[in-house]
Image (cartoon, coloured by chain):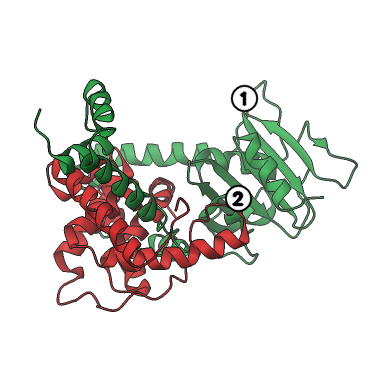
């Protein structure tokens, strides 16, 4: 591995969770999401090797990922109507309590299914801000939308999620 | 002041309101049921959506790393593409300097460490791991303490055959671990924990070093002492 490639891995691997979350919300299954993550990294590597280094890695990687999705990744693909199956990957645990962890896992599956039902623009905004941890300004640049529009989409997405959760009796830790 | 509960709540929760306006809105919230509902619903939605954050599986990280390692360079670096003979000569100089940097070369007043330890320090500083072959030892799994593998390879440090593993955590803290079949030489200035065969620690050129024979024969390096403390506790070194 060259110094440059090693630097690339060191700079970009911490963004793997962000890209994985984005990919999971933009594809139909885990395998497809993992392919998308890999494709994102390879395209980023190509740019890195051509000395196109970002100021901030996270929004840069998210932009590359979304560009792939927009360009060819989801061509002729449709999102399934059914609820996504349980995520085999590890989930962030809110604490070490086993009972809580089990509760959290079930709840996350339910929340994931609800997020899938949101309109695409709201889902993308919600994913970038709440799941990927980007700021509204970063999400605005990535989606080429005004910041106010992103804030509005995030807000509507959150509201819709809360309403659907209540209707489906999905609880969170605060309820 | 126009009253648009959805727009105001979105701006308030998104941090888009100036402090004075934000305070006014908070006062307004206490007397406006519509705005209160907007904020309460959106807050609950945020808690729900944030709870769905996933962590990329370790196997995926490994796959990404492997694909980067095996991805052939499609074209030479741009500097070499446009550089002429002078550029090429400069590139050769850079390459030679690079090779010199790879070789442990302590200054006249520096303490000379045994070759494997000195080479490990240089590798850590250069962010390199040996790259002569694939590893035969299993990489210590440190995901529980937040460290993911960023690089791996087999080779030698000094005369000692090792597998090298570079780790990173989400905050960018670095850790390098070498696993060997033969014992590592003790660093100059090493402090043993309890006796001749117990783990030892040392510090050299701003880098902390930890060495143990059990449960693995390993040499660990980091520029953050708390990282090595976490590793020794997690691996139950003795």
Give SS at disc 2: helix
**Circle 1: is it few (<14), some (14-19), or many (20+) Cα within 10 Å?**
few
Tell me what residue is drawn at x 68 percent, y 45 percent.
Answer: B116
Tell me what residue is drawn at x 55 percent, y 58 percent.
Answer: B153
- The answer to whether residue B210 is above or below residue A44 is above
Percent x, y for residue A51? 26, 44
**Which residue lies under the disc numbered 1?**
B107
- Give chain A's shade: red
Percent x, y for residue A29? 33, 74
Is residue B15 rendered to the left or right of residue A85? left
Q: Residue furthest right?
A: B195
Q: Is residue B107 visible?
A: yes
- Give chain B's shade: green
- Kindly identify which chain the residue marked by label 1 belongs to: B
Where residue A80 is drawn, which disc sits there?
A: none
Quadrant where the N terminus of chain B is found in the figure: top left
- Kindly identify which chain the residue marked by label 2 belongs to: B
Badge 2 and badge 1 in a common chain? yes
Percent x, y for residue B44? 35, 50
Where residue B145 is drawn, which disc sits there?
A: 2
Percent x, y for residue B36? 27, 40
Give SS at disc 1: loop
Residue B25's image quarter? top left
Is residue A16 rendered to the left or right of residue A117? right
Is residue A46 rendered to the left or right of residue B228? left
CA gap, disc 2 to disc 1?
A: 36 Å
Tell me what residue is drawn at x 39 percent, y 65 percent.
Answer: A169
């Amino acid at each position: 591995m060259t110094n440059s490639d090693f630097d690339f891995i060191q700079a970009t691997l911490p963004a793997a969770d962000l890209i994985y979350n984005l990919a999971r919300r933009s594809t139909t299954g885990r395998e497809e999401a993992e392919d998308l993550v890999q494709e994102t990294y390879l395209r980023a590597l190509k740019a890195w090797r051509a000395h196109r280094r970002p100021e901030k890695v996270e929004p840069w990687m998210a932009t590359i990922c979304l560009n792939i999705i927009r360009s060819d990744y989801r061509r002729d693909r449709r999102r399934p109507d059914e609820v996504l199956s349980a995520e085999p990957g590890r989930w962030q645990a809110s604490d070490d309590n086993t009972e809580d962890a089990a509760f959290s896992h079930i709840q996350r599956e339910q929340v994931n299914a609800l997020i899938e039902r949101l309109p695409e623009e709201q889902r993308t905004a919600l994913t970038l801000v709440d799941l990927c941890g980007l700021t509204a300004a970063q999400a605005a640049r990535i989606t080429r939308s005004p910041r106010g529009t992103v804030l509005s989409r995030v807000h509507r997405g959150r509201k819709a999620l809360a309403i659907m959760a209540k209707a489906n009796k999905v609880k969170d830790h605060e309820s | 002041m126009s009253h648009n509960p959805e727009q105001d709540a979105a701006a308030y929760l998104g941090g888009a309101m100036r402090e004075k306006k934000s305070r006014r809105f908070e006062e307004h919230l206490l007397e406006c049921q519509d705005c209160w509902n907007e904020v309460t619903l959106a807050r609950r939605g945020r808690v729900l959506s944030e709870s769905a954050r996933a962590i990329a599986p370790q196997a995926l990280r490994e796959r990404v790393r492997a694909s980067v390692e095996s991805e052939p360079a499609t074209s030479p670096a741009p500097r070499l593409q446009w550089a002429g003979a002078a550029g090429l000569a400069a590139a050769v100089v850079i390459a030679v300097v690079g090779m010199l940097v790879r070789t442990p070369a302590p200054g006249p007043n520096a303490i000379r460490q045994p070759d494997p330890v000195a080479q490990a320090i240089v590798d850590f500083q250069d962010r390199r791991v040996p790259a002569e072959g694939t590893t035969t030892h299993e990489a210590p799994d440190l995901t529980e303490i937040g460290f993911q593998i960023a690089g791996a390879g087999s080779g030698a440090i000094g005369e000692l055959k090792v597998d090298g593993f570079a780790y990173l955590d989400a905050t960018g803290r670095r850790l390098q671990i070498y696993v060997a079949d033969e014992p590592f030489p003790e660093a100059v200035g090493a402090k043993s924990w309890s006796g001749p065969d117990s783990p030892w620690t040392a510090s050299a050129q701003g880098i902390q070093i930890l060495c143990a024979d059990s449960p693995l024969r390993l040499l660990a390096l980091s520029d953050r002492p708390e990282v090595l403390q976490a590793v020794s506790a997690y691996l139950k070194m003795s």
